[in-house]
Image (cartoon, grey):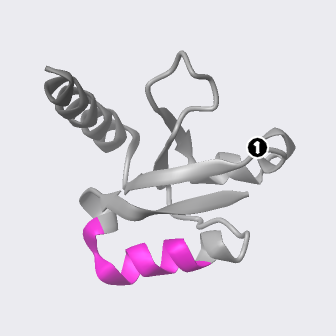
Amino acid sequence: MIIIGETLITEGLMKSDMIREKVIASLKKGKFSPIGAFGIFEPQNPDNLYEIIALNELRKTPYRRSIYRLIALTGSKSEAIMLVARLWIKKEGQKE
């Protein structure tokens, strides 16, 4: 199950309103977009900062058994990595 965060962040391809809304609508229905999009999720393991998962991977049984909180959508893995880096830097800055 996927819970979509209230303050969903989007990068790259997902900044397009049409594409983003289509992907979100698919996720809400329990279906997954054929677009090679990546989601950034709150970690399942408390030792991790975030989890980057290709949305198509969420079709697989191990992922369907857990609850994932989506905090960001990106159009590629490299965009996801860069966004996680920015989120981490922002989080570290708030600690100080």
Which of the two residues, 82 or 69, is positioned nearer the viewer here?
69
Q: In which image quadrant can residue 17 be found?
A: bottom left
The image shows residue 57 at horizontal and vertical percentages of 67, 46
Q: Quadrant of the N terminus?
A: bottom right
Inspect the magenta stretch and tell me whether residue 26 lies in it: no
The image shows residue 78 at horizontal and vertical percentages of 32, 37
Q: Amino acid at mark 1?
A: Tyr
Where 92 sits versus 68, above or below? above
Which of the two residues, 50 or 19, is positioned nearer the viewer here?
50
Q: Relative to residue 14, is residue 94 drawn left or right?
A: left
**Residue, disc 1:** 63
Residue positioned 37% across, 53% down in the render? 74
Residue positioned 76% across, 43% down in the render? 63
Inspect the magenta stretch and tell me whether residue 22 lies in it: yes
Most common secondary structure along the magenta stretch: helix
Which of the two residues, 33 or 21, is positioned nearer the viewer here?
21
The region drawn magenta spans 15-25
